[in-house]
Amino acid sequence: MRTNLDFSPLFRSSIGFDRILNALEAASRVETTDNWPPYDIVKSHEDEYRIAMAVAGFTQDELTITQEQNILFVSGQKTHAEDMQYLHRGIAGRSFQRRFELADHVKVVGAGLADGLLTIDLKREIPEAMKPRPIAIATDMALPEAEPKQIAADKQAA
């Protein structure tokens, strides 16, 4: 049994976390997922990833890869030019569309099709302005001297 979580209280007290909360909300929704075509997601280095998708029987012209903001769409549309009579059909040739949510600054750097495997290489490229940078600490800066403050008294002491 799956329960849906309500993230609306977090929207009231958090700023700038909209995408994370929306991703959690989308992940908690019950969806019927089609497990075809099978795929692997591999983290090859700290900021490099690869999606390998088994697309046996598809040609390069029948596959489409599109990145829109932080979503990667991979789809395949089989063209049936030949009308053949199959005695047994074990290689699926149906159309598909896969959707992958990408984190901020993850970009597709390349794709290839070989031996029935579609590979998509991804890399997280953080802009220089967002990378940590060292701050120099000066040692010879003199602090300005503070003048002593005098409190004016209206009453005189006896």
Image (cartoon, rainbow, N blue to C red):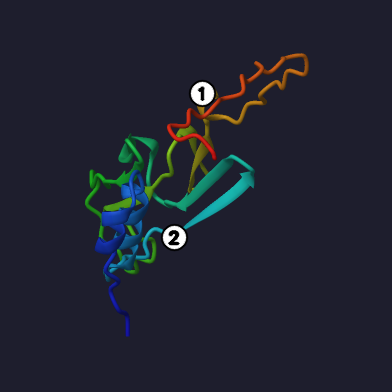
User: Quick check: 155 above or below 36?
Assistant: above
Residue 44 visible (yes or no): yes
Q: Is residue 26 above or below residue 145?
A: below
Q: Residue at x 27, y 63 (%)?
A: 9
Say which residue appears at 77% left-offset and 14% top-offset: 140
x and y percentages locating residue 96 in the rendered image: 29, 53
Residue under pointer 1: 129
Which of 82/43 is in front? 43
Distance between the alpha carbons at the discs numbered 1 and 2: 38 Å
Kind of residue at disc 1: Ala
Q: Nearer the viewer, mark 1 or mark 2?
A: 1
Q: Residue at x 43, y 52 (%)?
A: 56
Residue sitting nearer the eye, 121 or 118: 121
Of the 4 image quadrants, the one containing the C terminus is top right
Q: Please, what secondary structure does the residue beneath circle 1 have?
A: helix
Secondary structure beneath label 2 = loop
Residue under label 2: 38
In the drawing, does residue 57 fall left or right of residue 147?
A: left
The mark nearer the N terminus, 1 or 2, is: 2
Report if residue 106 is visible in the image: no
Amino acid found under the numbered disc labelled 2: Pro
The residue carrying pointer 2 sits among few (fewer than 14), some (14 to 19) or many (20 or more) residues within 10 Å by Cα, namely few
